[in-house]
Image (cartoon, rainbow, N blue to C red):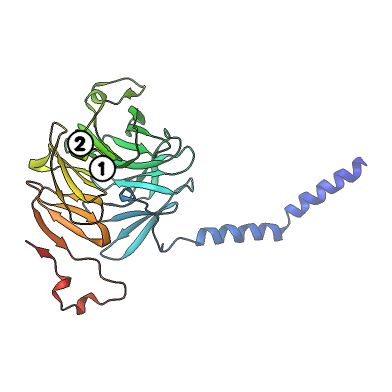
């Protein structure tokens, strides 16, 4: 009957308005506001793109699922950025001034997100990839962000993030594992399986078009190393700014000159090499079994081997053997 329907509706409304229901909702809201992430145990970085360090403050950032952990190694304290999409973070990189952090993620229609480090909030978002982001990097002049899709995506996008526009785009033909900008921000280099490619931004700077331009790129001349897997890349600094340095999974350190030609290489005497970092006077190569070897960028002369990380639970201050001290030539 119509009257019965009205009575049932009114009873439901009165039930929803009852103090007990409201108090339960308030309790849930209060509990949510009180629960905060205090500490993360573990890391989900799958490659060298999953770890970055602020060159000014020394703050270290790495992914743990959909969370970015900001670790202060001096104080051993963590802060956290939680990805609003709940998608797994796959790549990240600090801006040169350390104010911003750019992240890439996995999954369908992943986003490249820009975060304010101090406030730990998102300030910009780019959604131009389809299947996952493997590498991200800031240009030294802080004008551009480059993002490279994974092996199912294959897209390379150059993002003028302050204008919120993609200025150039192209595709790669193989899996990319590393990206690095030149010191003057005029080009960047991607590396991967049989892949060393130089991408040039001169046309992007002159363009005023709102639609992305084709990103011009030229392959490095690999010579005898054309069948190698290039794990990581770092463009030179200072007097070696015209050079580009790479490491291969087979354990070689390579140098490409300003003409993109393979100039020289040295054997790292290790089972594998996966990461690379450099300053104006030293190249550090991350190798198998926790080995880090140092070389001079001028002539690839071997400088020394850093001590391996100590085992968990050992007291470093009690070390008396020379094995705990660095070896330098």
- Tell me residue 83's x, y (percent): 44, 48
The residue at which mark 2 appears reads as: 222
Which residue does the image show at 28% across and 66% down from the upper left? 75
Q: Nearer the viewer, residue 119 or 214?
A: 214
- Tell me residue 173's x, y (percent): 34, 32
> Looking at the rendering, in which quadrant would you find the C terminus?
bottom left
Precedes in sequence: disc 2 or disc 1? 2
Q: Is residue 72 left or right of residue 238?
A: right
| Callouts 2 and 1 close, C-beta under 8 Å | yes
Which residue does the image show at 71% across and 61% down from the upper left? 20
CA neighbours of label 1 inside 10 A, class few (<14), some (14 to 19), many (20+)? some
CA neighbours of label 2 inside 10 A, class few (<14), some (14 to 19), many (20+)? some
Q: How many marks?
A: 2
Q: Quadrant of residue 37?
A: bottom left
- Tell me residue 287's x, y (percent): 24, 56
What secondary structure is marked by label 1?
loop
Q: Nearer the viewer, residue 113 or 236?
A: 236
Q: Is residue 143 above or below residue 209?
A: below
Q: Is residue 9 above or below residue 71?
A: above
- Tell me residue 149's x, y (percent): 38, 37
**Alpha-carbon span between mark 2 and mark 1:** 9 Å
Which residue does the image show at 20% across and 34% down from the upper left? 185
Query: Residue 228: which disc?
Result: 1
Query: Residue 184: which disc?
Result: none
> Looking at the rendering, in which quadrant would you find the N terminus?
top right
């Amino acid at each position: 009957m119509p009257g019965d329907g009205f009575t049932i509706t009114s009873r439901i409304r009165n039930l929803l308005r009852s103090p007990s229901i409201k108090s339960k909702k308030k309790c849930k809201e209060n509990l949510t506001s009180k629960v905060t992430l205090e500490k993360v145990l573990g890391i989900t970085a799958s490659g060298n793109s999953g770890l970055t360090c602020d060159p000014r403050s020394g703050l270290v950032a790495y992914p743990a699922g959909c969370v970015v952990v900001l670790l202060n190694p001096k104080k051993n304290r963590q802060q956290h950025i939680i990805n609003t999409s709940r998608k797994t973070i796959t790549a990240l990189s600090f801006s040169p001034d350390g104010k911003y952090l750019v992240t890439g993620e996995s999954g369908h229609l992943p986003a490249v997100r820009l975060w304010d480090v101090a406030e730990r909030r998102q300030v910009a978002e780019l959604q131009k990839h389809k299947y996952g982001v493997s590498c991200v990097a800031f240009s030294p002049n802080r004008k551009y962000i480059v993002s490279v899709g994974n092996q199912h995506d294959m897209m390379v996008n150059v993002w003028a993030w302050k204008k919120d526009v993609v200025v150039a785009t192209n595709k790669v033909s193989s899996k990319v594992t590393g990206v690095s900008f030149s010191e003057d921000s005029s080009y960047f280099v991607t590396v991967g399986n049989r892949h060393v490619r130089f991408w040039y931004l001169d046309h992007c700077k002159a363009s005023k078009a709102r639609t992305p331009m084709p990103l011009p790129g030229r392959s490095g001349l690999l010579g005898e190393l054309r069948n190698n897997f290039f794990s990581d890349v770092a463009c030179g600094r200072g007097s070696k700014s015209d050079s580009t340095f790479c490491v291969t999974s087979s354990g070689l350190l390579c140098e490409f000159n300003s003409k993109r030609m393979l100039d020289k290489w040295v054997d790292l005497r290790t089972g594998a090499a996966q990461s690379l970092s450099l300053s104006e006077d030293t190249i550090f190569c991350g190798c198998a079994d926790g080995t880090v070897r140092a070389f001079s960028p001028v002539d690839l002369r071997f400088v020394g081997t850093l001590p391996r990380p100590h085992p968990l639970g050992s007291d470093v201050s009690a070390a008396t053997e020379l094995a705990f001290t660095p070896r330098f030539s």
